[in-house]
Amino acid sequence: CDCAPAVAHHFAPSRQHPPPAFYHPQSLSQKQQRCVIDKMAIIKSGKVVIILAGRHAGKKAVVIKNVEDGNADDKRFSHCLVAGIARGPRKVTRGMSKKKVEKRSRTMKPFVKYINVRHVFPTRYQVDMDLKKVVDEADLVGDKKVEVKKKLKKIFEDRYLNQKQITSEKKAAGSSYFFQKLRF
């Protein structure tokens, strides 16, 4: 859709065109508000997304929680809590032993963060990993975040090694897509 704000104004401000308000939904045009609402309807818990901006740009993540209108505190924009893979598992071939496969899957490094909805690209894939129990919003500060990442790493490793045990064909496709390296 053509709801993206005019970025050219951001780089070359003029008196005729004020810089667009990127974050607050009430300051957007109706067309832009519709696009944000459409995107929010797509981004739900369990959806596999691709991060578009920031340190983890180009990495895949799973949406844990979605906040549509933002909260009154520091994030007044639509955002979501995501958990993803900063460093994926190493390449595995058929000839490798089970022990070697497990060792190569231990290289996974997870990340957890809040991210603006405009900086994620939803895919068609869903994953049925239950991450809400592991990632509590209160635990995302200080040393507790390290513990959350360790638990996430264990969940991701278990799912990666036991992909064949997933019963639903749709969820199996989402899981295999989530662990593949993004080719671009």
Image: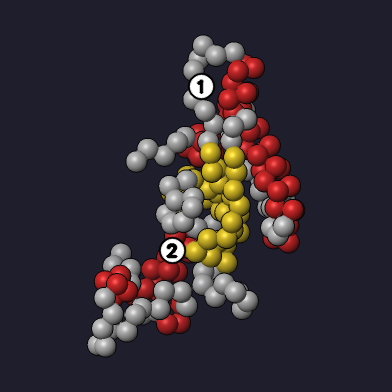
Q: Which mark is residue 118?
A: 2
The answer to whether 100 is drawn above or below residue 121 in the figure is above
Query: Residue 98 location in percent, x, y?
Result: 62, 16
Amino acid at dot 1: Val
The answer to whether 111 is drawn above or below residue 114 in the figure is above
Badge 2 density bin: few <14, some 14–19, many ≥20, Cα 10 Å: some
Q: Secondary structure at mark 1?
A: loop
Badge 1 density bin: few <14, some 14–19, many ≥20, Cα 10 Å: few
Which coloring applies here?
secondary structure
The answer to whether 111 is drawn above or below residue 94 in the figure is below
Q: Secondary structure at mark 2?
A: helix
Spot the residue most to the bottom.
15
As rendered, which of 64 and 150 lies closer to the eye? 150
Residue at the spot x=70%, y=52% of the render?
145
Apparent side of residue 155 relative to residue 119 in the rendered image (left or right): right
Amino acid at dot 2: Arg
As rendered, which of 31 and 112 lies closer to the eye? 112
Residue at the spot x=42%, y=82% of the render?
27
Q: Which mark is residue 92?
A: 1
Residue at the spot x=60%, y=18% of the render?
100
Q: Write down the quadrant of residue 140 in the picture.
A: bottom right
